[in-house]
Amino acid sequence: MSNKTTPVIQQYLSIKEQYKDAILFYRMGDFYEMFFEDAKLASKLLEITLTSRNKKDDVPIPMCGVPVRAVQGYIARLIQQGYKAAICEQTEDAAAAKGIVKREVVRVITPGMIIENEFLDEKSNNYIFSIATQKGRGDVSVMGFSYLDISTGTFRVSESEDSDAVIDEMLRVSPKEILLPESLKNPSYSQAAMKDLLASVSEKAVTFLEDRFFDHTRGRERLLDQFKTLSLEGFGCEHLKAAVSAAGALIYYVGETQKQKIEHLTGIETYVLGDYLLIDDLSCRNLELVKNLRTGTKQGTLLGTIDRTVTAMGGRLLFRWLRYPLMNVKKILARLDAVEEAKENLQAARTIRENLKTVYDLERIGSKIAMGYANARDLIALKRSLNMLPKIASLLSQFKSGLFKWNKETEFFEKIGFLADLIEKAIREDAPPTIHEGGIIKTGYNSELDELITISKDGKGWLAQLEVREKKATGINTLRVRYNKVFGYYIEIPRSRANDVPPHYVRKQTLVNAERYITDELKTFESKVLNAEDRRGALEYELFDEIRKEIVKNNPEIQAAARFVARLDCLLNLSEIAEQNNYVRPEINTQGHIFIEHGRHPVIEKMITGERFVPNTVRLDDSENQILIITGPNMAGKSTILRQVAILSLMAQMGSFVPAGKASVSVMDRIFTRVGALDNLSQGQSTFMVEMQETANILNNATSKSLVIIDEIGRGTSTYDGLSIAWAVAEYLHDLRAKGVKTLFATHYHELTELAMTKSRVKNYNIAVKEWNDEIIFLRKLVEGGTNRSYGIQVARLAGIPDKVIQRAKKILFDIETGEHGDDVSYTAPMVPSPEGKDQCRERPVQLELFGSPGHFLTDELQNLDISTMTPLDALNYLNELQERTKKLGIEN
Ligand code: ADP
Ligand code: MG
């Protein structure tokens, strides 16, 4: 008989057929087994032994397995690597089954569909993101998108005609899994945007669903069914067809993977992309907002510096505030008001923070309870958290800011109080982690349960009595009544007294020193007690489930409490870090100014050792100070000041105080950054191409309300190319939509400082250094005016370049600057050390004074000119041509 036809394998294959893209965990007794390709893959991913089923057969079936007890850890590892696990259980009692045991997939765990805390990072959301396209007005394709964190119930939706914006948004949301219509697998004709999209998600877990699951009408019905409403009007997305299609597909997928109603998903939040300051993914990385470029962790990032939230919910919300800074001035001011008030009442605020520390992750506990994955300990955690809320509310009553006020206070607290009381009355503090074996419900909660407990308890007394009675009757003083799992209750008597045992004792087991007996009386007693205990376990589970349902009914209140706590935690966090780090309240102006007096970089000021951070003052406006060209030697602090301005603007828009003496900022719509390719070489991208793509993005998308940070441009190509591009880019930004855009432009091309002479809103700054004994001292001060020296050699010395090389470099530089380069100097392409790249060299021409001494670039041509063959007219024409060419290059003399 071939393997494939054994009933188990047949059943396996028919189930596997429905879960092709998941690894099927097929329950067999105490193990989950995997077969065929799944087994090969899983054994590799999980580092477990690959064996085979029916080894003797010609074609053995590859197989591997994990014990049921340990399955969580294995699933977690698969999910982290982007795989899915379909959990197939035995759905009938193996002993009662006729033939093969029935099995069913009860749940599919995917990277974007996780409930268990063990798999989740407490301070970040775990999102699944779905995208759908619809034909909109005038045949424009509209892209709808929606994302969901099933562990918290967070569910959002929006749409846009701009596919790039949707891709940006997806990167910002940073989902763990992406849901797409199958037809996008091979995007056709006009779907260039889709190709970009697919390329940008290629490293993530992508799940394709048949297109029909993205159908608008069906999707809308699914949402109405889920939310139990008659329209989506109340959620603000009734009219957004593409958005609803995307959200509808998510609900379908939730059903397919969870195999149950998700009661905690009671609504969806519609939002508009343009309502938030957009910091694209690249800028987010460049500014190191949430992830350290080198280590990939939160340390050394803005989030790492300003996140002192004390609850998981607060931590997740702060992350969101940071990635979605506000543009609505009123809302920004409301947050700032609250932060300020808390800072002024620091003691009260700190007391509240202390209390918040004991509030558990209400969002995730609520979801876990709703989905039936919670145990009694979760309920206890919920109770403790709910009990904290009235106390926190009363501490808050002295605060006036709107954001510190609970809505619908009394009704809300009645419900919360009711739930806490219910749990208090019913659930034992010392409950075990399992929910099927009793020990969960307190005595006094349910009379039937109390009776059952009495029976088991009384049983113990009865046994003691029995022992006394039997000792007397038999005269055997060493007689004991005992219990073990194999035999149940028994009477034990030392071997030496075996002859004194009465005839109604039935011998069960003989040990070296003892004999064990049972009696009818003992058996009857045993079944009564054991029945009571069985029944007790079942009844406790029923009671637990009733309480669970009661909690689920009030889940909207729990979620509301969670939202409030999260916001409170964030606001108090911002006031605490403002206090600790000496931040000030920024003003929000409407004149388009960014004025930062004595500003500091919040992360670097914490990280530098030895040196003190030098504050700097920066003014940007739309008149004289729109484009600041910042020069200065390497290591002077150019990059730092650029990022500082971007980060401070962002902090202000999230409602935070800022590290400065004084600050006034206007609301930005986007922050763009373009950071020197050398600065993120670690990412292994082809430098110049990436640099130009990033620049193109800025030039095509910046508006007069954006803030642009350009930190070195053109370094990936030759000096002349680079300078020309940098020059043209700066000009373009100055003239953008006839208004220009606020730009900080750090560059090592000193020539760019000449722009200030022709472009009215350009201003030159440099970061001052002091020369001292042929060394440089970094002053870190931004001052007006350009520089004309790069101090590259001095910086090279600081980096530890051998003195011999330094001396030689100085000689070459001197010769070039004085135009006295002799035969021994070749300046076309010597290997020069790159100061940032520490230990790497790359080919780069020595930087020439392009506009300072035009002589040498004409030399070759003039030397090769054969004057003897020229007519006077030729000569005149040639002279004219030379003049035109030099003019084009902008050479004046
Ligand atoms: P550049 O971009 O000009 O090469 P960076 O901005 O990368 O220079 O700064 C180099 C180093 O100088 C930073 O890592 C930091 O340690 C230090 N630094 C920069 N700005 C300041 C400042 N204002 N105060 C103190 N140290 C600073
Ligand atoms: Mg730099």
Image (cartoon, rainbow, N blue to C red):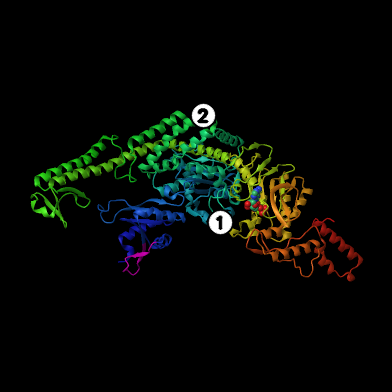
Residue lying furthest right: 872
Q: Which residue is mark 1?
A: 199
Q: Amino acid at mark 2?
A: Gln
Query: Is the magenta region chiefly helix, strand or loop?
Result: loop
Nearer to me, 499 or 785: 499
Q: Count the labels in the image.
A: 2
Nearer to me, 327 or 453: 453
In screen coordinates, is 448 left or right of 106? left
Report the span colored magenta: 48-63
Tell me, yes or no, if residue 781 can be seen here.
yes
Tell me, yes or no, if residue 18 can be seen here.
no
Query: Which corner quadrant holds the N terminus?
Result: bottom left
| Residue 398, numbered circle | 2
Give the x, y percent position of residue 414.
Answer: 41, 30
Give the x, y percent position of residue 222.
Answer: 45, 43
Give the x, y percent position of residue 783.
Answer: 73, 47
Nearer to me, 654 or 793: 793
Crowding around mark 2 (Cα neighbors within 10 Å: few <14, some 14 to 19, many 20+) is few
Q: Secondary structure at mark 1?
A: helix
Q: Amino acid at mark 1?
A: Ala
**Where on the picture, by quarter, is residue 271?**
top right
